Image (tube, coloured by chain):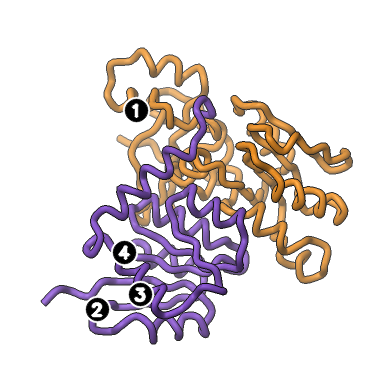
Amino acid sequence: MAIWIRRLIGPRELRAAQGTADPSQKTLASPHADIYFTSLPEVVFDDGEAEPAFGGSQEDGDTPAPYVSSLTQWERRLAHIARLNLLLIATDVDPREVLDALRSDCHQPITTWTPGEVLVLPATAQAGTLLLEDISALALEDQRRLYGWLDASTGWMQVVSITSRSLLPSIRAGAFLEVLYYRLNIVCGEVARVAEPPHVRP
Amino acid sequence: MEPLQRIVVVSEPALGNDLLTWLPAETYRVTTVSTFAAAKAQLRSQPNLVITQLKLGEHNGLHLALRARCQGIPAVVIGEPDAVFERDAVHLGARYVTTEELGREQMLSLTQHLIPWTDPDARSDDRVRIRRSAPAGSL
């Protein structure tokens, strides 16, 4: 399937857009503008899922980001506004790369966990983002703690989990809690490395 | 004669059959599918309403509700009683119906309310709810 890529804006570009007279850019200055996934570019599939322009594009001289996401721009924006948890399946990308990209773009207080670390959970009333790298490596005991924390959380915390493989086999094997899976996987998207050069619009 | 209102049901066969029985064929054209991918394909035809189970194998029915909302299609998510999922559904403007309260009368009433032709205010109410959910300064 042919794809072409638009890159979402970063904080600097957002600030620049706020001063522009271009109406299409003005929308970026809206309080609902999402600058969260700035390293995950817009993917416009050629099956009719094209969306309005958002941010820079190749013809503007921007460097396309190295990853593509199966989530649409509006899915990401609405998920972010409603603070829905995201599960990102990194098919051919190291989950650490994805986590680093998200961390560098995040403009809110964040807490991260990577395999081998102790899972430190923020206060239940805290707002922000919890980034979990390679969630399949989370020990059962920590899964239970995380599930309890999610249920008790009263703040505006969005949990973004990354995994390199489907968790369903782990659930069937009893190595991953099904209840936690559906808590973390409200919105699910695949993240992959760009496989072909993006088309440049004439 | 008014055209049939189109409803996409995403569920296991048993629930799909119940909904087919409950929603009168003279008013609704119900299409049942069982996977997230098939449901996404159905959304392209812009149905009037989406009714989905919460657990869709690898996916969550709330994701489908989110997709539907992106297209302005109202959505109902059916799942076990769960305050967190219910809150998430409300945040994205969907209705959460528990398996305990699921029944013919309730689904008929909800369907009539959510399909814009029969209740034009339903969608604008949902949009307001999404905005109110976001705390000041969180974006």
Picture colour for chain B: purple
Tag 3 residue: B108
x and y percent of residue A31 in the render? 42, 27
Q: From what the image shows, is residue A130 above or below residue B59?
A: above
Asked if residue B16 is positioned above or below residue A178 in the image, the reply reads: below
| Chain drawn in orange | A
Q: Residues within 10 Å of mark 1 (few under 14, many from 20)?
A: some
Asked if residue A134 lies left or right of residue A36, the reply is: right
- Amino acid carrying mark 4 in the image: His
Q: Chain of mark 4?
A: B
Q: Quadrant of residue A123?
A: top right
Q: Amino acid at mark 2?
A: Thr
| Mark 4 vs 2, N-terminal side | 2
**Helix, strand or loop for disc 1:** helix
- Give the x, y percent position of residue A192: 60, 47
A31 w.r.t. B53: above or below:
above
| Residue type pointed to by label 1 | Thr
Q: The C terminus of chain A is located in which quarter?
A: top left
Picture residue at 62% right of the left edge, 27% below the top = A108
| Residue that mark 2 sits on | B27
A118 displayed left or right of B138: right
Q: Are marks 4 and 2 on the same chain?
A: yes
Pointer 2 and pointer 3 on the same chain: yes
Label 4 vs label 2: CA separation? 14 Å
Circles 1 and 3 on the same subunit: no
